[in-house]
Amino acid sequence: MYSFFEKSDDQIQVDVTKELRFDPSLTSTQIAVTCKDGVVTLSGNVPHFFEKTSAEEAAQRVGGVRAVADEIEVKLMGAYEKSDEDIANAALNAIQWNFSVPRDVKVSVDNGWVTLRGEAEWNFQRTAAKKAIGHLMGVVGVKNEMVIRPKADATDVQKRIEAAFKRSAEDEGKNISVNVQVNKVILTGKVNSFSDLADAGVAAWNTPGVGEVSNRLTIN
């Protein structure tokens, strides 16, 4: 049994490959995995944008992974191919029927790439918009240019991060420094795992007024 610190790059590569094969949402067998110093690189091609994001999430679930570089390309085939007009209409319907997405989101499509513009009060609204579009057939990629307007407060961000770790019986929140520049949050410090690093980022995103998170935390 490997601990986080004992896992070799070869073992991480094997574990990520197994996780990709285990995930039922991934149908492509054309994904290659490499690993160096805990950084996993995914390459190859998939038939749908949703599978690209699923592969990245699967790799992040594996213990020992410090970061994921997603170089997977989306190559549409057969029924997955749609015109930009079809994608635009489907995207507008997806947004209108999604309770979490602001109603005034603007959509543009260019060769299967969907660009989202508009304003949101919370990051979860921006994330919901991207997920709603990412599941549509014909989508090659999503550029999320939605902005969050309210101004963030450094003290509020710090408290939310510490509270998030306390709920999981951990005290790592106090080892994280928070710097707020308008609505951009910069996190620095050290945590014990990739999961802790991700949790800190989520806590920062879940703070009102946060429009961008620069997660510069490192793993011990």
Image: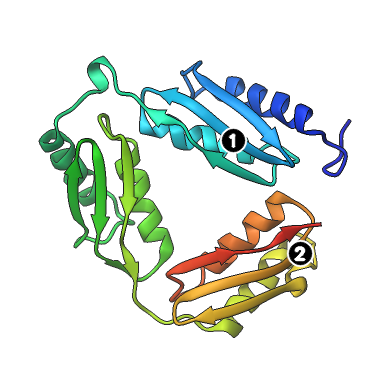
Question: Looking at numbered disc 1 in the image, what kind of residue is underneath it?
Answer: Thr
Label at residue 41: 1
Relative depth, front residue between 102 and 200: 200
The crowding category of the residue bearing disc 2, from other C-alpha atoms within 10 Å (few below 14, some 14 to 19, many at least 20), is: some
Q: Report helix, strand or loop for mark 1.
A: strand
The residue positioned 40% from the left and 54% from the top of the image is: 127
Question: Image quadrant of residue 114?
Answer: top left
Label at residue 190: 2
Q: Quadrant of the C terminus?
A: bottom right
Q: Position of residue 219 (x, y in %)?
A: 76, 56
Q: Position of residue 46 (x, y in %)?
A: 41, 24
Q: Position of residue 212 (x, y in %)?
A: 46, 67
> In the figure, is residue 46 to the left or right of 20?
left
> In the figure, is residue 72 to the left or right of 69?
left
The residue positioned 20% from the left and 36% from the top of the image is: 111
The residue positioned 45% from the left and 82% from the top of the image is: 182
Q: Report helix, strand or loop for mark 2.
A: strand
Give the tally of numbered discs. 2
Question: Looking at numbered disc 2 in the image, what kind of residue is underneath it?
Answer: Lys
